[in-house]
Amino acid sequence: MVGRLGARSEVDQGWRKDSRDLCRRPVQVVLLARADPDGREHLHDLRSLRGLHPQGPDSQAPRPASRVTAPALAASPATADAVDWALAAHVARRVAGRDALAGSYLAASLDDDFAEVTAQAEQLVAEHTGLRTVGTARAAVVNRQGWVDANVSSMRHLVGPLTERMGARMLKSPVGGVGRRVAATELGMLLGWFAQRVLGQYDLLVPDDDGNLDDDTVYYVGANVLALEKRFAFRPRDFRLWIAIHEVTHRAQFTAVPWMRDYFLGLVKQALSTVDADPRRVVRAILRAVDELRNGKNPLDEGGIVGLLATDEHRGVLSQVQALMSVLEGHGNRVMNELGRVHVDGQARMANVLHARRRTQGASGLVHKLLGLETKMRQYEVGETFIEAIEREAGSHALDPVWRGPENLPTLDELASPSTWLARVA
């Protein structure tokens, strides 16, 4: 998954958003189908994953990455906010449920393996892309509940100004308290759903224990990784390296490119500042959706519910975010697959399996459509197709102008016309 909204292809990635997630956030996330299909274990706690038991042949890594744990979730402050964040986290943990493999001997190998493959991936990515970071990537193997806590912290940091603005309006309503709980429940359900599917995620918005943003940690959801390895008989060491390459690539994009982090956060701030927190906008959006349906259009095609509620100004910012994320996601997939073909045994099968799973979501396909996640999935394909096209025409370093400054980012129109972008930045 790059940051949150936001973690999905060979490694299925996706970005989360709800009615308060009004822009795409980088979230390098890797998804899989739900590991507990009958839902019997939803209400059980997931024990922490610990230790390590070697699986498969050892791979030499240049150095072990340091390990961290997911940040503890702070209690909701007694201030106006449209979301009860503590309740959202509670609901998400319950929905995320427990995976039977979490307490098995197989979990013993996760910590050490991911520490080593993260360091190995960091070196491979730097040599392949030329994007060299200042710090060192740290691997954090968490259970689903730990992933929920990290993501609630990140989402709260990202959309806090907006939800507080909405909360101020809700204070004037006699049902404002109910609204906070409803919003928290909806958000918790969504995060819990993702917690069952995420394999790995890099998020530049998760605060550390001192409240500072931590841009070095890469998260891996151990139980989900084990479930996929077991179901498809993937070699653990190779599959874990493949996941790590993808997440470390996203970290390099945000930490090795000097302007990227501030540019992204600036787009987020701009998008949130243009949002009208007035509930009456929902009514107007519904009327607009009805008109689009009458004209034979699907009102959820562009960005799901969030796109439906966006203003014209907001749509302009969202198009910039979408173009940026298409490039980053496409680049991440491209690097993962190119390095995987050389360094990961069975990479082609892994890619085929997860690509097919992403296209056969079953009932969850409706969730993707409503939330605009289908658009997110298309970003990977659009971005990767764009990069393949420019590299065929201009060589393996064709994307390099992008890293020099935001003015060189392709627009949505240029993503569909790679030669136009090449002519502009030549």
Image (spheres, rainbow, N blue to C red):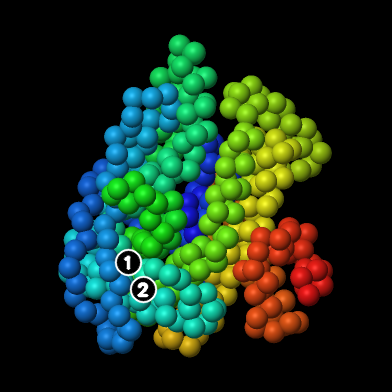
Q: Quadrant of residue 269?
A: top right
Instruction: Give how far apart the Cα atoms at labels 2 and 1 are.
Output: 6 Å
Q: Secondary structure at mark 1?
A: strand
- Residue 296 lies, in percent from the top left, at 79, 42
Figure check: 285 above or below 73: above
The residue pinned by badge 1 equals 139
- Residue 387 lies, in percent from the top left, at 67, 73
127 or 283, nearer to the observer: 127
The residue drawn where x is 33% and y is 84% is 62
- Residue 69 lies, in percent from the top left, at 26, 57
User: Does the rendering let one see residue 338?
Assistant: yes
User: Does the rendering let one see residue 246?
Assistant: no
**Image-based side of 260 in relation to 231, left or right:** right
The residue drawn where x is 71% and y is 65% is 408
- Residue 356 lies, in percent from the top left, at 53, 68
The residue pinned by badge 2 equals 118
**Image-based side of 367 in relation to 208, left or right:** right
> How many other residues sit within 10 Å of disc 1, few (<14), some (14-19) or many (≥20)?
many
Contact (Cβ within 8 Å) of mark 2 with mark 1: yes
Query: Which amino acid type is shown beneath numbered disc 2?
Result: Thr
Which image quarter holds the C terminus?
bottom right
Query: Which amino acid type is shown beneath numbered disc 1?
Result: Ala
Figure check: 284 above or below 157: above
Q: Quadrant of residue 383?
A: bottom right
The residue drawn where x is 31% and y is 87% is 60
